[in-house]
Image (cartoon, coloured by chain):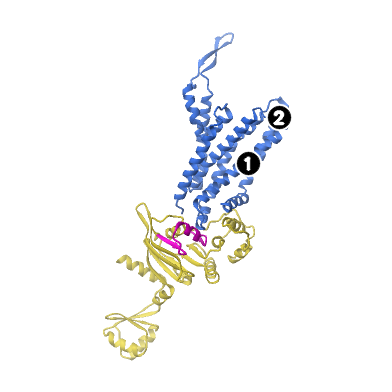
Amino acid sequence: MELVLKTNNLGKKYKNFKALNNVNMHIKKGAIYGLIGKNGAGKTTLIRVICGLNNPSRGSYTIYGEDSPKGILKARKRMGAIIEAPTLITSMSAKDNLIREFIDVGRPSLEGLDELLDLVKLKDTGNKKVANFSLGMKERLGIALALVNNPDFLILDEPINGLDPEGIVDIRELILKLNKEKGITVLISSHYLDELSKIATDYGFLDNGEIIKEISSTELKKKMEHKIELNVNDVLEYVKYFELKKINYEVTSDDTIIVYGSTLAKLTKDLYENNLTPNKIKEQEETLESYYINLIGGLNHE
Amino acid sequence: MNRLLKANFYRLKKNKMGLIMLIFTLIWAFVTIFTKYISLKKYNSSVEIELLIFNFGYIFSFIMTIFCSLFLGDNGDNTTRMRIISGNKKRTIYIANFITVVSVILGLFFLYTCLILVIGIPLFGEINIPISTFILKLFNIFLIIIAITSLYTFIGMVLSDKVIVTVLSIILYLVLMFVGLLLVSRLSETEYMTEMVSTNYDTHEFSSVEVKNPLYVPENVKKVIRVVLPINPFGAYLELTQNEVENLQILPLYSLGIIILFNISGLILFSKKEFK
């Protein structure tokens, strides 16, 4: 499996403060990688290091397998990024901002400029100055600027911060379009877990400057599957019944069984009909948010 | 490098900064010629055409300060961030910005010089100093301009805050100009000065007496000042335009020293600079 980005024990220290500590991160080609972490967890620092804006204090990273300074510089030509706020010249129009970026990255002509404006739904803004744009329009223009050099790896740091619901939907659709149609790998950091869960194919959970868990959305979905927890006296009796009825279950302790793929009402009815009376019965539905909280909470309590 | 330069000039064109500088230079050139021509016709006063060129530096250096700090401050961290992310070397970014500001500033000074020469010579006559001295002085001025630009590029690229860059550049301009003026004026002080003393109060008769000039600087100190003064590029400019300079051939070395020192240290600090 080809990795677009791989970090090896990456660290960043500011005087006595460790912003990043042994970060090991793996982003597969074609993925939408959601980087999750609370404020101050080190998300932006990690992105700044990857983008070359900050130098790592220790460790290393590879972009498209390149790890030498020269190779990384070359690989960065295939990258686009928006860190915190997009880099826009507010006294110029969207088109002029793009023209400038076209020249900056050395595109031989302005071919593709209109398509780019169209892609981010800014084709009709004409000579309107960026200063008069809404936050969502500025964010979309920022993404267009990051796409000027035809990157196949896009880094977006908190791209939906402060956007209204419509703006959030626009950005979500745009990211999905770029990923599905153009095959662009995306690293996206966000606080909006619900929103991230709609698009991400992989997740990295960052806490106190450390990646504490990397998981694919498929694995995560399995973990977040609807489940019912039973507290019972005789586990064996229940196991026999579930085997017989071909019900998906998992014994997690001497007195606890987790049942998947059933509703509380149906399971309760079935159990009583078969003279099985659990001590306690609890329905559980995990979200990305609760998974994250449990992960962070669990670690914080260790 | 070429594409970064192209992008810089495109931005200059788009945000009118370059156009404002151009209009200012043109207006200043025409107003200078017009006012001198009026005073020539009215009072038959002589016009030294080379001074019209050399004295432009006083106002131009202030405009230069504003331009450099605005362009580099504005073109600073945000644009630089994008350029780094898309795989440009920090060294290339620094040099491209330096070349941009130097080109604009030298280009405008050159334009002003050409206008004064082309329109001024038919109106006011030839240059009053030997042509070789004029060319050498002009060459020195161009180097001093590059030296000053190196200083401002250093500030603009190493610091991040646009406001701090602008304020610091203006303060630096004022301090260096003040120190330069002070030292140049001290150099021109004579040992004795003439003072008028009343000899008869009733008839209001006065006679002149030679008194010691308290501002006089001894010759050995003057020698030291002459050596130190060109380290300050504004001082070098003042000395070049106001006094008879003996070391016209050595003066470029000072400017070159400043250019090399600030560009090399700027490049080192900029390559270590961390961006938000």
Residue A247 makes an appearance in the image: yes
Q: Earlier in the sequence, mark 2 or mark 1?
A: 1
How many residues crowd around disc 2 within 10 Å: few (fewer than 14), some, or many (20 or more)? some
Which chain has been coloured blue in this picture? B
Q: Position of residue B201 (x, y in %)?
A: 56, 9
Residue at 41% x, 73% y is: A287
Residue A271 makes an appearance in the image: no
User: B173 and B150: which one is in front?
Assistant: B150
Which amino acid type is marked by label 2? Phe
Residue placed under numbered mark 1 in the picture: B108
The answer to whether B187 is drawn above or below residue B162 in the figure is above
Marked residue chain, label 2: B
Which chain has been coloured yellow in this picture? A
Residue at 58% x, 40% y is: B63
Quarter-of-image position of residue B134:
top right
The answer to whether B62 is drawn above or below residue B3 in the figure is above
The answer to whether A44 is drawn above or below residue B134 in the figure is below
Q: CA distance from mark 2 to mark 1?
A: 22 Å
Residue placed under numbered mark 2 in the picture: B124
